[in-house]
Image: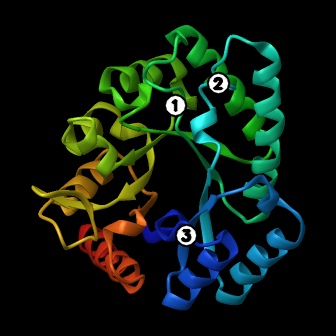
Amino acid sequence: MIAGVSTASLYPMQTEDAVRKLGELGVRNAEIFVNDISETDGIVFKDIMSAIREYGLNIVSVHPFMSPMETLFLFSDYPRRVQTIIDIYKRFFEFTQAVGARLFVLHGADIKARCTEEVYVERFMKLCDIAESYGAVIAQENVHYCKSGNIEFLKMLKRECGERARFVLDIKQAVRAGYDPLEIADAIGDKVVHLHISDNREDADCVPVGRGNYDIAALIKRLHGLGFDGAAFVELYRGNYNDPVELKESADILEKIIKEIK
């Protein structure tokens, strides 16, 4: 297991600057949240790669900015739009491969989408097939405003997708959906490959690690007991902390937790 930080925590800082900032802070493991399709190649891509090399960053996962469009495109009943987003995501898969990452984070369809479970599984599996050809693995994140926010939906996806089922467990998203993250861990923990970590308390559902009272160590220990050996990455929103140094401090606490579990 390793600890790190997602560049999403620095939004709306430009992606190349966010990557460099994490390096400057001393973060060594990171997730890149791609904020525009133009960042997957050209000058910006070169700047991102330059920062990765300069600081020796280990990029584990990639998160596309187009998550809100997955309902309208990937899980649409209009075939042309499905193919359009697949073609776009191939560029993201190329980016994922180029930065040395393996995991690609998927939000999936909005909770109100008309997409049936059968169609969802079919599209998910299709995207997994395509991603695999780029050496990438699709990991479904639990997101409170998406179908994946429902624990029964996650169980269904695990059951129907078999070995292709992989998940990102996000603490704040679980809390916002009304679950203790441990409930989700018990339901799909053996298929969880990545964690988005934040702390919480009664008056705030997303704060730096150590600034809340959630037992993060218990969650990671439970998942580790189920076979989890992936990355636990700090993912906050910019309004949830005062100074970027808090991101590194949170990652350091996670690193300590991981060492104690091991």
Residue hosting label 1: 165
Q: Earlier in the sequence, mark 2 or mark 1?
A: 2
Q: Where the N terminus falls, by quadrant?
A: bottom left
Using a 10 Å C-alpha cutoff, classify the residue at mark 2 as few (fewer than 14 neighbours), some (14 to 19) or many (20 or more): some
Tag nearer the camera, 2 or 3: 2
> In the rendering, at what x and y percent does residue 102 appear?
65, 54
Query: Does residue 251 lie above or below 212 as drawn?
Result: below
Q: Residue at x 90, y 66 (%)?
A: 42
> In the rendering, at what x and y percent does residue 197 appear?
35, 60
Q: Earlier in the sequence, mark 2 or mark 3?
A: 3
Depth check, front residue: 57 or 225: 57
Q: Amino acid at mark 1?
A: Ala
Q: Earlier in the sequence, mark 1 or mark 3?
A: 3
Which of the 4 image quadrants contains residue 19? bottom right
Residue hosting label 2: 72
Is 258 left, or right, of 80 in this rendering?
Answer: left
Is 92 left, or right, of 67 in this rendering?
Answer: right
Q: Residue at x 65, y 79 (%)?
A: 17
> In the rendering, at what x and y percent does residue 67 appear?
59, 40
Q: Residue at x 39, y 33 (%)?
A: 145
Q: Amino acid at mark 2?
A: Leu
- Helix, strand or loop for disc 1: loop
- Helix, strand or loop for disc 2: loop
Which of the 4 image quadrants contains residue 198? bottom left
Q: Residue at x 68, y 32 (%)?
A: 128
Residue hosting label 3: 30
Residue 57 shows in this picture: no
Q: Amino acid at mark 3?
A: Ala
Using a 10 Å C-alpha cutoff, classify the residue at mark 1 as few (fewer than 14 neighbours), some (14 to 19) or many (20 or more): many
Q: Work out how far the residue at label 2 is from the one at label 1, CA to CA, in angstroms.
A: 22 Å
Query: Does residue 150 lie above or below 216 as drawn?
Result: above
